[in-house]
Amino acid sequence: MTRAFVKQLNARWPVVLGALAASPAWAQDAPDFSRLAEFVRWGGVAASVPIVIGAMFLIRLVQNAGDRLAARFSTRRPLIQKVQTSLRFGLYIVGFGLATSLSIRLDSTALTVIGGSLAFAVGFALRDLVASFIAGITIIFDRPFQVGDRVAYGGEYGDIIQIGLRSVRMNTLDHNVITIPNNKVFTDVTSSGNYGALEMQCPMDFYIGVDQDAPLASEIIREACLSSPYIFFDMPVPVLAKQVILQDYMAFHLKARPYVFDCKYEKPFETDVHFRVLEAFRKHGIKPPAILHRSTNPVEP
């Protein structure tokens, strides 16, 4: 019986191998990319080319017009940049939707075939792009920051100049334009200094010796901030004070929190105030922290 079974198995084995080679199991689940051409409207593809070019032209026009208006009407710059970003996103979506509707027959069968055929591409090759696109839309509505904001992110500090479909562009204070993928924005802490407003708080630190006149130094710092041409007068100028240990010796820390009227003048504002404070400290004899030596001899009556 064993020999008869082996002979029968050997006789049928080539037939089984041929069937498996002709129709592998994984081929039944793979998408049929050849059917995609049946749903492409080649005339619509040609017609969508001018639409794409026109959309890119309008996007560039909106970008240039927004930059010029923001430079001319500086007090309205945050509002202009918000409108500019929204229009750019709208043109992107409308242009893509028109080109897709003209180029592809979007019936139920087409959606089924296209969805199955592109599942692997979207899932692997385009997963980062799709994630960035969704994150870009989330940024527009959730607004962790806006175009024109001065933001600290990932060790970089600068102004957000563009929020696109794939990435955010930041112009650092060293005039380096860096690109941040949208999906990376939500994986790190982002700090916005002005959050859509022109004015921004500019904390400044000053240190004097513990034996110096701290109340006078505080008034000098406040006057230096108020006399600067970059000050925003609608907000108060508090000066906070505390005693700290600096370089293993005692010092008096004075921290001013004035507001600059436009965030792009943050560094000129800091420079102007520090120069004014330095000159006033020299004039009134207020000295920086130093190591103090105390006498251990008893005080004679």
Image: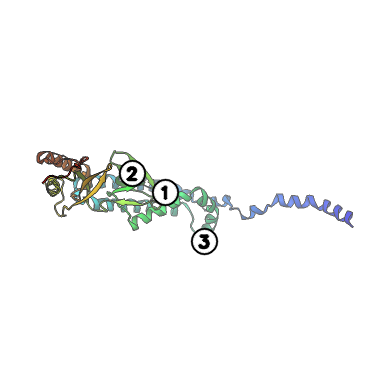
Whole-percent x, y for residue 121 in the image: 52, 50
Q: Indicate the quadrant containing the N terminus: top left, top right, bottom left or bottom right.
A: bottom right
Going by the numbered disc 1, the residue's amino acid type is Ser
Of the two numbered discs 1 and 3 on the same chain, state the one appearing first in sequence: 1
Secondary element type, mark 1 = helix
The disc labelled 2 sits on which kind of residue?
Answer: Glu
Circle 2 residues within 10 Å: few <14, some 14–19, many ≥20? few
Label 3 vs 2, first from the N-terminus = 3
Q: CA distance from mark 1 to mark 3?
A: 22 Å
Measuring 32% from the left and 39% from the top, which residue is drawn there? 176
Which residue is painted at 9% across and 39% down in the image?
Answer: 283
97 with respect to 109 (left or right): left
SS at mark 2 in the image: strand
Check disc 1 and report the residue beneath it.
48
Give percent across and percent down for residue 47.
Answer: 42, 48
Q: Position of residue 259 (x, y in %)?
A: 19, 50
